[in-house]
Amino acid sequence: MKLLRSVIFVLFTFFFTINAQSLEANNQSIGNSRQTILTETVSKVSESIVGITVTEVRKVQDPFFSPFFNDPFFRQFFGERSTSREIRSLGSGFIISEDGYILTNDHVAGNATKVVVTLTNGKHIDAQIVGTDPISDICLLKIEEKNLPYLKLGNSDDILIGEWVIALGNPFGLFEVNEQPTVTVGVVSAKNMNLDPVEGRFYMNMIQTDASINGGNSGGPLVNALGDVIGMNTIIYSTSGSGSIGLGFAIPVNKVKRIIDELKKNKKIDREFVTGLQVQDIDDEIAKYFKLNSKRGVIVTRVFANTPAGEAGLLSGDVILRINNYRISNQNSLLGVLQEFRTNDEINLTILREDKELTLPMKLKRKK
């Protein structure tokens, strides 16, 4: 009987041990399966994200005086009735070099009188504006630190529609509270998206994503599954008061890289050129008069002599369809596309003239 009890005890212990080991192995397998390329990427890039606190001096209307005092007639008697105020705002940025270069949007920090960067270790550091470009909405900052973690700038020409992307940043100032970036995940929804200008800023060839981008996310990176930066989160479309609805847009990193190089070298972007063109959007009447099959493009209404347009051979009545590889839809898109070029660049204009497509080279010469 004692022998039987001993055998049963041994068997019970054996099976209990086997089951425990199996359960532990199963739990470990489940735990391992939670680690994905996305979680690994987030862990790798998070330390390079910064919160940005901006102090800006803005002129505001004195609330004790009527808006009528803005009229020049009243100002000659009562003087300027605006006052200057310090406005604080928050945004996002990311470190791109171990010696402290940081990227953000111009609309975040471009007009700042003071910029303070918050690192993920809780350290607050004053930053200097190296250069900023309102037209492309890109601003380059610098902090005096060494051996910083930084992000690799990828290649936005290689992105795939539908691939996983991660947006990181400082929505609603949460970075200031937690000293860590907020992460949202989505896919590349579309690329080469041209948006309407906003307050003189032109957004061409943008990357569209459904990764949530909210207030304060501006200036943060959009990275692919490998952790390479493919864009800078910049703008969202939303219905009134609804916040993010899955229509976020990022400036492609290849454009960002070009702007960075120019800002480091010249502190500004050289677009001091003229075209010598006057154009107009194509409406139904113009399309009918010129027997056009489409209202896409702009029609040339005047060409000034001794200008790039005149030297290129453009004529009134020509319809501009493309500049290099950019399609021209209307005047806004024409203005936006021209901002992609620099003084002394040579561009190719594809035009429609008397039912024939022609390509004319034009050099963007400096204003005299």
Image (cartoon, helix red, strand yellow):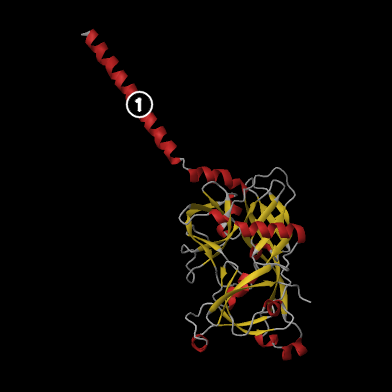
- Residue 75: percent from left, percent from top: 74, 87
Judged from the image, the secondary structure of the residue bearing numbered disc 1 is helix
Residue type beneath disc 1: Ala
Q: Residue at x 73, y 52 (%)?
A: 143
Q: Residue at x 49, y 69 (%)?
A: 241
Depth check: 187 or 336 in front?
A: 336
- Residue 33: percent from left, percent from top: 42, 39
Per the image, the residue denoted by label 1 is 20
- Residue 170: percent from left, percent from top: 58, 56
Depth check: 80 or 165 in front?
A: 165
In the displayed structure image, the side of residue 305 where residue 51 appears, left or right: left
Snapshot quadrant of residue 17: top left
Depth check: 343 or 124 in front?
A: 343
- Residue farthest toward the left in the current orientation of the protein: 1
In the displayed structure image, the side of residue 18 where residue 247 appears, left or right: right
- Residue 214: percent from left, percent from top: 53, 61
Depth check: 157 or 16 in front?
A: 157
